[in-house]
Image: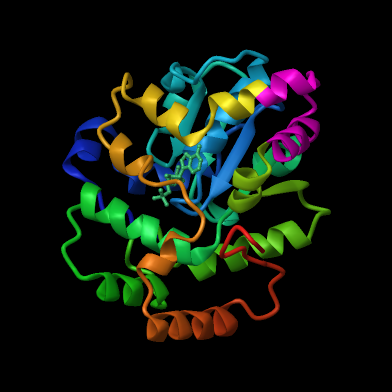
Amino acid sequence: YGYYFPRSSIEKQRYPDPRENIPDIIKMKTRQDDVFLTAYPKTGTHWLAEIIYMLLNKRLEYNTEYVKVSAMLPLQTPEMVDKLSSPRILNSHLLFSSLPRDILTQKNKVVFVNRNPKDVAVSLYHFCRHTINYEGSWNDFLQLFMSERGMVYSGPWHKYMMDWDNVIKDNSKLDVLVVNYEDLKMNPLKEIERLAQYLDVNNSTDFYSQVSDRCRFNQLKDDYKNRNDPFREVVFRKGDVGDWKNWFTVAQNEEFDKHLTEKLTNSSWTFKYSVKE
Ligand code: A3P
């Protein structure tokens, strides 16, 4: 299917084999109020999932009932997803072609998270070191990240972005809301209001402002201490824009920029590499 999901021993204990679920996901029935949260790994999906949960439920409570309302496709079987209560938040790192065809019939809401790929690469490097014990160097990792088959985690970043760029441009298919990690970081209230409008959930500015506060990096990181998530330390690692500058050499940066120009030709993506942009 074009994915690469190396599984940590913890994931093997907790979840069924994703390879068995992928063909069935396409056939899954969706519900009209399902929200699909779609993003390449390490773009801030946990953050968005908490915000969306608060907005949909109109409560300033964290998504501690994660397993009751949310799923990470393809880690759960369609039967497991079917048992979740509405409104469901269905996360995935999948290409559009692997998601349920029913999304088109139900015209489900799809929130796509975009983050500058240099910070994504650094974040994913740390994630892979902690979860699947990746032992190569940063440079080896970066080469894998840029490689055609993208054999790091999930699949090639550039193919994922090109796939979703096509879906987003063809908005006769679906109305997708793109949220930029950097915008959310710099202007959370504005982005949360935009999200609420897209999700058709009206609330007060005061409520949105409290959602923003409760979902700040340190607040979420603290709350995760009480949750049974073995990867929480690395999922909430730094939460900064521009950490890539501590990792990329000048030569790596030039190589990466060239890679982006080659691979994302004709796409509409733009990226914010520092908070000043
Ligand atoms: P870093 O590794 O750069 O710190 P995902 O949820 O998709 O796995 O993404 C994880 C990344 O999002 C991590 O990036 C994490 O720190 C960052 N993140 C999580 N919550 C955040 C928040 N409230 N504000 C800013 N960044 C956040």
Whether residue 55 is situated above or below residue 8 in the rendered picture:
above
Q: Quadrant of ligand 1?
A: top left
Task: Locate residue 226 relative to residue 219 in the image: left or right.
Answer: left
Q: Residue at x 64, y 33 (%)?
A: 35
Task: Locate residue 59 relative to residue 109 in the image: left or right.
Answer: left
| Residue 255 on image: x %, y % | 44, 85
Q: Quick one: 133 or 75, which is closer to the camera?
A: 133
Q: Is residue 99 visible?
A: no
Q: Quick one: 24 or 240, which is closer to the camera?
A: 240
| Residue 239 on image: x %, y % | 45, 46
Q: Residue at x 62, y 13 (%)?
A: 59
Q: Residue at x 52, y 69 (%)?
A: 159
Q: Magenta includes 196?
A: yes
Look at the image and give the residue range highlighted in magenta. Answer: 189-209
Q: Magenta includes 157?
A: no
Task: Locate residue 3 relative to residue 108 in the image: left or right.
Answer: left
Question: Magenta segment, principal secondary structure?
Answer: helix
Whether residue 148 is situated above or below residue 159 in the rendered picture:
below
